[in-house]
Image: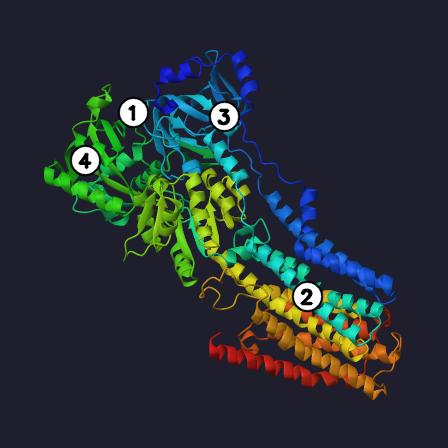
């Protein structure tokens, strides 16, 4: 038989212990055999290996290849500045990878890395003596004593219980404390056994004695932690896209290099020189500034999101959140405020439940109802720093708060006796020394309290409770339950001291019903509407009662009240095949209730198989496996367990679902902005490539040198590209559906716009101005031109300046792929404006200082030659604005 089905005596016998507990020697022996009562932490990858991993990602490997080729070119043709280019590329790899590692390491240090939820000390019986020991020293067979407020250190079987309520939220997700007793149970599974206390939970009320039967990784807590550690994490879509982008760029560069190498060979170019320029083309085609810009853009996005209470643990999670198509959210604490509140009351056998405000107006006629909420509880008063608070069942705290609203500070009537809550009676009663004599106050489940009542409160006093009144009360209870409220019945009577519960809890006066709820967060309904507009489905997965879950879903707008929702409970889910589950997930309003940890993970994996990008929220240990298996795991920062935070990619510092929507908006903006600065960066690769094409095909001197390309790639364009990376979200970003999962960062549309439209205009400008300057000075095609010739230095500086100045125009055009520059404006992004100033300042340093001339191989260009750029700047502006206008008209 399972341990929950055994009697207390059989449990003690099976674990070879007794009511006096283990003796010390036996406890030490079992500790050696079973090990310490702790959750083993997953072995994390050493920091040095994680750091090296940042330098070995595919795009980093592309940069390593580019650096190697640059060093090779320097060895073949020394004096061309290729060694400096190689060193700079290596520096980019180290800085970018190091910055990415530092960001994630810094966030990790702000979170507890899988700290145990178990208490440090616990009271046990050993050798017949009560003693406090460290929780890690617990062994199977130990007898543990529990009181209100204690945490449960291991999986235990109750032997004795007195009004014991346990808060299982961290393991099962249930918001309401659950009654526990020491009687045998027929329930399947440990989690719902009424005589089982699970590690990681806490005692909300009452006291008890229990024997430990599982410790450490053998507990339900430990099993869930193992699922968390062994479960795989989905690969970030952004990681996949960066890898795909890297492969596309390197393939394009190699293809162009091979074609030009072949063309040069056919034209009779010396083989060695032909090979050198083919390699040079590959170096020119690789956007060295992309990786650091991408990393910095993600870091800045994480900082913006942190200001909106969204803490990013892994940089790619910023963008993944924006790609989300489905959010699987728990209820308690995320959609709700995680506190019980009285929202309606049935006063006596009234016609209907009334809101609290209306009930308060009639308090003088129903004071016994409020006396019941004031005295009938097991709360413990706490005072800390002069502040008064109450520890215990949140429901009882809510009832006491209601009484204090009506009565002020309740009268200090001594408690004469009490009859604790138990699972059989489902009632709690206390006897207070009221001025008019000893009075019993009772609260509990309506189906157990109402049969004990023979009279009821009314506006004129007390009257007999008729069958019609009973039916009316039952209907009121059902209507309150349908609204998702937890309903309690209240009753009272005058009694004599020293009588039994069976005698005292009869012939009661029915005082009324109380409906309590864990109210939804204020911002959640609006967040749900935003999700609908953004094409994001929200699915509730909770451990709470299905009726409560459905009522909450309708209240916040998650489920449409005009159609029937599909509610699947854990028992039903267990019977569904994978195919049936995937078909059920197509229902527009589906809710999962009473689910276990592995079931939540199964739901997430089914959604992923359907092609969705899944975000999962959670706070308990039971949520951790699903958080880790989802594309994006979102843990609660305030009430979330450390296990959940360890498994998540994102931590909500305010535990608010609405913050997720803010994060999605930022995440969508990140993807848009990556495409913006990708367009901007790739556009200047074309005017850098064009001189190589002209040299190989037409024997024209290189219009720009490698070191000057470096000045653009990782110097002048860096801050402006980063400015595009922090552009505010587009106005319609949350009014459009999630981007298709197959949408690429570098798709044909972006490539055509960057390479064959913007880039071609810049390339035409560079080559035209370069050749005009040479011809004006008397150079003729075919004449050799030394690298140190003043004319060559002058012409290449003009080419470099042309790229920089046209990129300044281009950066404002790239602020939006569709909106006109009249709408985006020139201001509103201080980093972009700072980048423009840096570009202009860098151009002055390169072209007008002796040090800049020497290092970059340039000469000062006359102001008249800068005016040659103006027609091309106007052409770039007019052409791109025309393209945007046509795109808006076509609706693309």
Q: Give neighbour class at mark 2: few <14, some 14-19, many 20+ (Cα, 10 Å).
A: many
Whichever of callouts 3 and 1 sits on the residue coming sooner in the sequence is 3
Q: Which mark is residue 215?
A: 3
Which residue does the numbered mark 4 point to in the structure image? 510
Camera-side residue of 583 and 455: 583
Give the side of residue 346 with respect to residue 207, left or right. Answer: left
Secondary element at tag 2: helix
Q: Is residue 636 visible?
A: no
Camera-side mark, 3 or 4: 3
Q: CA distance from mark 2 to mark 1?
A: 72 Å
Q: Does residue 799 appear to the left or right of 290 in the view shown?
A: right
Q: Position of residue 83 (x, y in %)?
A: 83, 61
What SS does tag 4 mark? Answer: strand
> Does label 3 or label 4 sit earlier along the sequence?
3
Of callouts 3 and 2, the N-terminal one:
3
Q: Residues within 10 Å of mark 1 (few under 14, many from 20)?
A: some
Cα–Cα span, label 3 and label 1: 35 Å
Quickly name the residue at label 2.
719
Dot 4: within a 10 Å radius of its alpha carbon, few (fewer than 14), some, or many (20 or more) residues? many
Q: Is residue 302 above or below residue 76?
A: above
Pick whichever of labels 4 and 2 is earlier in the sequence: 4
Residue nearest the viewer, comparing 55 with 498: 55
Question: Closer to the N terminus: mark 2 or mark 1?
Answer: 1
The label number, if any, that marks residue 95 in the structure image: none
Q: Which mark is residue 418?
A: 1
């Amino acid at each position: 038989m399972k341990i929950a089905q055994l009697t207390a005596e059989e449990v003690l016998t099976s674990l070879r212990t007794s009511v006096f507990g283990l003796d010390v020697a036996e406890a030490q022996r079992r500790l050696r055999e079973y090990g310490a009562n702790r959750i083993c932490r997953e072995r994390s990858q050493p920091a040095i290996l994680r750091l090296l991993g940042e330098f070995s990602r595919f795009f980093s490997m592309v940069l390593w290849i580019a650096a190697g080729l640059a060093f090779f070119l320097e060895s073949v043709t020394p004096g061309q500045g290729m060694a400096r280019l190689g060193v700079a590329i290596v520096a980019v790899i180290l800085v970018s990878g190091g910055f990415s590692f530092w960001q994630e390491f810094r966030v990790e240090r702000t979170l507890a890395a899988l700290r145990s939820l178990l208490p440090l000390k616990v009271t046990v019986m050993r050798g017949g003596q009560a003693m406090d020991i460290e929780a890690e020293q617990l062994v199977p067979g130990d007898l543990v004593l529990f009181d209100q407020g204690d945490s449960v250190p291991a999986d235990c079987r109750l032997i004795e219980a007195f009004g014991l309520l346990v808060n299982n939220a961290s393991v099962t997700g249930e918001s309401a404390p659950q009654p526990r007793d020491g009687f045998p149970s027929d329930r399947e599974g440990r989690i719902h056994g009424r005589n089982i206390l699970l590690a990681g939970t806490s005692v909300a009320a009452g006291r008890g004695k229990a024997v430990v039967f599982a410790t450490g990784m053998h507990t339900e807590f430990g099993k869930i932690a193992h699922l968390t550690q062994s479960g795989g994490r989905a690969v970030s879509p952004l990681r996949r896209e960066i890898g795909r982008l890297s492969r596309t760029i390197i393939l394009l560069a190699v293809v162009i290099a091979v074609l030009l190498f072949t063309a040069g060979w056919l034209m009779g170019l010396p083989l060695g020189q032909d090979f050198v320029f083919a390699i040079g083309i590959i170096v020119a085609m690789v956007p060295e500034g992309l990786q650091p810009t991408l990393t910095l853009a993600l870091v800045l996005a994480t900082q913006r999101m942190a200001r909106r209470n969204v803490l990013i643990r892994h940089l790619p999670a910023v963008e993944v959140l924006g790609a989300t198509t489905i959010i699987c959210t728990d209820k308690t604490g995320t959609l709700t405020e995680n506190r019980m509140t009285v929202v309606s009351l049935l006063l006596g056998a009234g016609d209907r439940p009334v809101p609290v405000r209306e009930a308060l107006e009639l308090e003088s006629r129903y004071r016994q109802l409020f006396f019941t909420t004031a005295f009938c509880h097991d709360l413990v008063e706490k005072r800390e720093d002069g502040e008064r608070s109450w520890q215990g069942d949140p429901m009882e705290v809510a009832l006491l708060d209601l009484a204090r609203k009506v009565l002020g500070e309740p009268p200090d009537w001594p408690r004469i006796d009490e009859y604790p809550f138990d699972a059989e009676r489902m009632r709690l009663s206390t006897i207070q020394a009221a001025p008019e004599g000893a009075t019993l106050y009772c609260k509990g489940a309506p189906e157990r309290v109402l049969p004990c009542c023979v009279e009821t409160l009314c506006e004129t006093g007390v009257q007999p409770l008729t069958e019609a009144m009973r039916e009316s009360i039952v209907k009121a209870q059902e209507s309150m339950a349908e609204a998702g409220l937890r309903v309690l019945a209240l009753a009272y009577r005058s009694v004599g001291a020293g009588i039994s519960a069976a005698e005292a809890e009869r012939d009661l006066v029915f005082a009324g019903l109380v409906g309590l709820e864990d109210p939804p967060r204020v911002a959640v309904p609006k967040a749900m509407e935003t999700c609908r507009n953004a094409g994001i489905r929200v699915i509730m997965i909770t451990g709470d009662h299905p009726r409560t879950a459905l009522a909450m879903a309708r209240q916040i707008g998650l489920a449409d009240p005009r159609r029937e929702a599909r509610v699947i409970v854990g028992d039903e889910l267990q019977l569904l095949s994978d195919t049936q589950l995937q078909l059920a997930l197509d229902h527009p309003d589906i809710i999962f209730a009473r689910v276990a940890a592995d079931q939540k993970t199964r739901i997430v994996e089914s959604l992923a198989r359907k092609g969705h990008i899944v975000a999962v929220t959670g706070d308990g240990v039971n949520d951790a496996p699903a958080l880790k298996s989802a594309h994006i795991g979102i843990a609660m920062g305030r009430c979330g367990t450390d296990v959940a935070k360890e498994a998540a990619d994102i931590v909500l510092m305010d535990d608010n679902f609405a913050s997720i929507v803010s994060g999605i908006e930022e995440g969508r903006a990140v993807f848009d902005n990556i495409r913006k600065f990708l367009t901007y960066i790739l556009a200047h690769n074309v005017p850098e490539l064009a001189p190589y094409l002209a040299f190989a095909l037409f024997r024209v001197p290189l219009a720009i040198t490698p070191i000057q390309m470096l000045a653009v790639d990782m110097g002048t364009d860096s801050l402006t590209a980063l400015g595009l990376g922090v552009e505010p979200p587009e106005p319609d970003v949350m009014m459009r559906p999630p981007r298709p999962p197959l949408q690429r960062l570098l798709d044909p549309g972006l490539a055509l716009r960057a390479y064959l439209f913007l880039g071609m205009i810049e390339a035409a400008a560079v080559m035209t101005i370069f050749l005009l300057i040479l011809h004006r000075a008397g150079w003729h095609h075919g004449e050799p031109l030394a690298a140190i010739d003043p004319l060559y230095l002058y012409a290449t500086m003009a080419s470099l300046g042309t790229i920089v100045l046209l990129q300044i125009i281009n950066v404002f055009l790239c602020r939006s792929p569709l909106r006109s520059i009249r709408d985006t404006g020139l201001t509103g992004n201080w980093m972009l404006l700072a980048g423009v100033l840096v570009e202009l300042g860098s151009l002055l340093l390169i072209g007008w200082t002796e040090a800049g001339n020497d290092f970059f191989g340039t000469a000062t260009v006359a102001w008249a030659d800068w005016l040659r750029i103006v027609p091309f700047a106007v052409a770039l502006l007019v052409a791109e604005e025309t393209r945007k206008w046509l795109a808006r008209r076509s609706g693309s």
